[in-house]
Image (cartoon, rainbow, N blue to C red):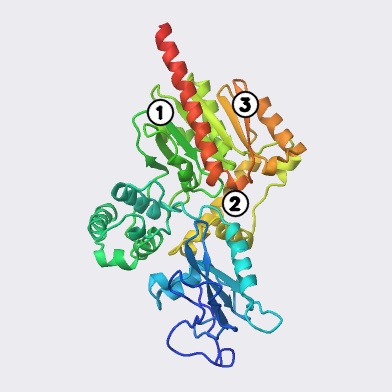
Amino acid sequence: MNGSTAPETSPAACPTARPTTWDAPTTRSNSAASASNPPRSRPRSCPLPGVREAAVLVDQDATGQPRLIAGIGRGTAPARTAHDWRTALARRLPDYMIPAAFLDLESLPLNRSGKLDRPQLLRLAQESTSTQVNTAAPRDHVEHGLYRIWQRILLHPDIGVSDNFFEIGGTSLSAIKMAHAVTETFGRRLPVGEVMTRPTIETLAALLREDRTARAPGSLIEFRPGTGPRVVCVHPAGGTAFCYLPPATLLPDTVALYGIQSPGVNPGEDLLPSVEAMAEEYLRLLEPLGDEPLVLTGLSYGGLVAHEMGRLLAGAGHRAVSVVLLDTQATDDASARAEIGAVDAAEFRDKLVRFNGMYPGIDDAQVDRYFHLYNHNRLTAREHLPAPSPARLILAQAVPDGDDTPFHGEVREFWQRRAEGEYRVETMECDHWEILEGVGAAQVATLLGAELAHHGAQLTLSIQEA
């Protein structure tokens, strides 16, 4: 996939190709493009290797801003990811001409007249992009490092990895400050001109990865410093913790937020053998714990580890501890757990694309690390049966469209049997993977904030009674 080279398109497959640029006759470079200026009737052939025909249309994103949609008819050539196409075009076109979304198809849709079916192409684009999650938050430590620099310099409340620096408040002066901060953080001189030509976190991160100058962090990542209680987010099965950044911006400023990513994400790291071993190691990373309230949370697999961490802490006498499970599923049925197995490489890559993990600059070795780590964590989940815990427990359960099922009830009852302390369920009308997106992220932030407030009130009461 990444790193592979598509076969050259033969002259017979590309009879009208010109050796100059990626021929996209329907591209418009400004928002004036509209239905009154329809694209040419047929997609043209294209000299880019692995392309038989291509068309670029102007669509609108969720905020109503224009974006370019590329439809690629590759014929019999192997399929490629959006990152592969974006990288190939970056060598030929300026950033502003590179489409925001790519449709990799065997052939482009035509209408009954044999012309490009523009509405169908746009529908396919909307369907393909609507299935992705985490399209704005940083996806690795390089993008996260840049994200924090941008937050300090731009003071913008909502920054995405594909946002243009100069469109969200950046100026030539702040670009100089940003370039200096990048040099200090990553140890690589960044000319201001690079900021002009690579004005997004995504494209700048790709440049830093190419130079191998970005130092990988350890397993504990500080998302945000704080002067008060801590929220600790444990990685899902995929191993990284950057999916927790959306609700992070909605928590009170005094709250310190940390993410824990799985050993094995970075080269040379040894995998931990079990959920229990992870819980013990991650608690060591958090020392000294002190008496401040602590909220542990985890999406899906991460909830299993967070629950075990909370059990160990509460068992050791820590009272101001809550565990917030984000749609974490578990069962007492040994035969059901035995069915949890490894996924094959093709299925894993599909997941990685859907969850926007195929960022620019990712190499095959990193994809392979993610693949082995994901399957390792799945197998540790198969062997783990959560034990009863005295920690305060909250289950945030995804119930799409409010359609409660017997399975949802079984999961609630499972966790109730594990709760020796307070236990409650919060229903979220969203899909499992939407919990940390949009409205779901706001609900999660509210839950976390409520738990911190609960422990703060208990602490105040204890002081008054003393």
Residue at 59% across, 29% down: 394
Where is residue 379? Give x, y as percent: 62, 46
Residue at 41% across, 37% down: 257
Residue at 50% across, 32% down: 448
Q: Tag on residue 424?
A: 3
403 relative to 60 in the view: left or right? right
Determine whether label 1 and label 2 are within 8 Å by CB: no
| Lower position in the chain sequence, tag 3 or tag 1 | 1
415 relative to 273 in the view: left or right? right
Badge 1 crowding class, 10 Å Cα cut-off, few under 14, some 14 to 19, many 20 or more, is some
Name the residue carrying label 2. 375
Where is residue 161? Give x, y as percent: 42, 56
Q: Which of these two is toward me, 205 or 196?
A: 196
Quadrant of res 337: top right
226 relative to 301 in the view: left or right? left
Q: Quadrant of the N terminus?
A: bottom right
Q: Amino acid at mark 2?
A: Asn
Where is residue 68? Give x, y as percent: 49, 69
Mark 3 vs mark 1, CA separation in Å: 22 Å
Residue at 55% across, 53% down: 133
Q: Which of these two is toward me, 186 or 326?
A: 326
Badge 3 crowding class, 10 Å Cα cut-off, few under 14, some 14 to 19, many 20 or more, is some
Q: Amino acid at mark 3?
A: Arg
Q: Tag on residue 117?
A: none
Mark 3 vs mark 2, CA separation in Å: 31 Å
Which of the two marks, 3 or 2, is nearer to us in this view? 3
At mark 1, the secondary structure is loop
Q: How many numbered dots are placed on residues in this image? A: 3
Q: Which of these two is toward me, 239 or 181?
A: 181
Q: Amino acid at mark 1?
A: Pro
Badge 2 crowding class, 10 Å Cα cut-off, few under 14, some 14 to 19, many 20 or more, is many
Name the residue carrying label 1. 229
